[in-house]
Amino acid sequence: MEGYIFDLDGVLVDTAKYHYLAWKTIAQEFGFELTPAHNEQLKGIGREVSLHKILQWAAKTLPENEFQSLALRKNELYLQYIAHIDNSELLVGVADFLQTLKSKGKKIALGSASKNARLVLERTGILPLFDAIVDGTMVTQAKPNPEVFLKAAELLQLPPAQCCVFEDAPAGVQAAKAAGMRVIGVGEEQVLCAADEVIPNFSSFVLHNS
Ligand code: G6P
Ligand code: MG
């Protein structure tokens, strides 16, 4: 493999918990208790689609302007949570693995639905390691659509078959498979069973495996 494409939240950085806390606060405002099980279904899914799902679970409809202001407020809460993050939020083994890829001359890209992706890469100090970044501001179709990963491969100037994706969300695993890429799930085997391989984290990952 020549290209390595990473999802952001829950793969490189421990920010999934902040998305969850922010959505939980928003949901509580209209009396809905968002559980970790609900949150699993929001991983990898864009901001507005996430809010649509939460409202559906809560059997609630909102006028467009209120919908937009809730989405905006969720982001303000999330930004407060990540205001002071640094490289201690990088998940275990990530910094070493990115350095290994660099030293072997591999290409590194980001494929994330988040519109805050650049900010998070910058704050955690890993932005300079990326050859290409595709984030939520650059795609029109959310995961499980393969657009985000196909765009990343295009920017790396590599065919999809030469790219390996790392994902923590079922929607992302599906997107990577649909893009014709090898996908390594980062997390739990039973959640990510559609991946080609599942690893608990990067500390034990050996490059020649993929
Ligand atoms: C990632 C996360 C989701 C988040 C989405 C949009 O895919 O896994 O939990 O909702 O990005 O993030 P944003 O920062 O643009 O609200
Ligand atoms: Mg993720």
Image (cartoon, rainbow, N blue to C red):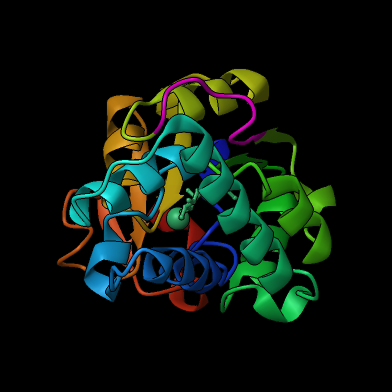
The magenta segment is 134-142
> In the rendered image of this protein, does residue 75 appear above or below residue 35?
above
Rendered image quadrant of residue 95: bottom right
Q: From the viewer's perspective, is residue 153 above or below residue 116?
A: above
Q: Is residue 28 left or right of residue 66?
A: left
Q: Is residue 125 visible?
A: no
Q: Residue at x 67, y 48 (%)?
A: 117
Between 181 and 79, the one lying in front of the other is 79
Most common SS among magenta residues: loop
128 left or right of 87 in image: right
Q: Is residue 52 magenta?
A: no
| Image location (x, y in percent) of residue 133 | 68, 36
Identified at 42% across, 23% down, the residue is 141
Work out whether residue 133 or residue 96 is closer to the camera in this orientation and state it: 133
In reply to whether residue 138 is colored magenta, the answer given is yes
Q: Residue at x 34, y 69 (%)?
A: 187
Quarter where residue 88 is shown? bottom right
183 or 127: nearer the viewer: 127
Q: Is residue 37 left or right of residue 20?
A: left
Residue at x-position 31% and y-position 70%: 31
Q: Position of residue 182 (x, y in %)?
A: 35, 39
Q: How many marks?
A: 0
Residue 135 seen: yes
On screen, residue 18 versus residue 197, left or right, reads right
- Residue 138 position, x and y percent, is 62, 25
